[in-house]
Image (tube, rainbow, N blue to C red):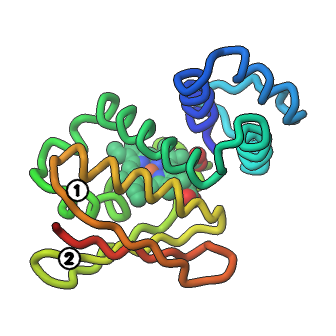
Amino acid sequence: MKGVVFTEFFELIEELHDYEMVDRVIQESNVESGGNYTSIGSYDFQELVKLLITYSNISGNSIDEALRLFGHKLLKTFRSGYAAFFEPYDNARDFLKTVDNYIHVEVYKLYPDAELPSIRVEDVDDNSFRLIYSSSRALGHLAFGLIEATFELYKEEYTIEMKSTSEKGDEVTFLCKRI
Ligand code: HEM
């Protein structure tokens, strides 16, 4: 997992709490890297899992909720850092269709060690579509936050129905319907 994911996660904890909380989560997680992440480095995904569990235990916020909020934070960071990916589109569906076959492809070219999910978008009708997330990292709630934040960004109102289509949570379907 890229270091930027870890540094953004610490920023989120600091925003929701304070720096002492970040420090405590790092100390109590006992992660191998000792919490020293650089944004372009790559680190074991299990370190993120440990940090999430520790954060959840200390704060009382569930891992799922923390991941959802993290999705909102990451989308804002992507929007300001990579505006060119968003600007050609005026709606969330068209933008989301480009994640798998364009955005993540570009990310992968820059960082061949990136661990990226598959994000498939299937049209249902004019007002609804399905987004199918699949990844061995099973971060469906992170995807949920990213999708929710995308609708907010494009100022569109949708309901999102999340359904795990595998027991391990490595495949999740989001049915998105315009309100
Ligand atoms: C400009 C927009 C985007 C950029 C630049 C971007 C880039 C990235 C990067 C750098 C990672 C980390 C890879 C790693 O740590 O190895 C990542 C992971 C991920 N991305 Fe994107 N992404 C974007 C939009 C989205 C959107 C809209 C979704 C919505 C579903 C999404 C879903 C995910 C998920 C769920 C992961 C976590 C890894 C996994 O689940 O396997 N991304 N992305």
Residue beneath label 1, please?
Answer: 95
Instruction: Residue 59: name its quadrant.
Output: top right
Disc 1 C-beta below 8 A from ligand 1: yes
Residue 162: x percent and y percent? Answer: 44, 72
Task: Out of 80 and 22, give the one closest to the viewer.
Answer: 22
Give me the residue at 44% from left, 77% from top.
173
Type of amino acid at the residue the image marks with label 1: Phe
Q: Quadrant of the C terminus?
A: bottom left
Circle 2: is it few (<14), some (14-19), or many (20+) Cα within 10 Å?
A: some
The one nearer the camera, 56 or 109, is 56
Which x, y percent locates residue 28?
A: 87, 31
Task: Kindly identify the residue that appears in the image at 33 percent across and 64 percent down.
Answer: 101
In the rendered image, the vertical position of residue 168 relative to residue 102, given as above or below: below
Depth check, front residue: 15 or 92: 15
Whole-percent x and y of residue 71? 46, 46
- Disc number for residue 34: none
Against 13, residue 48 (above or below) is: below
Q: Residues within 10 Å of mark 1 (few under 14, many from 20)?
A: some
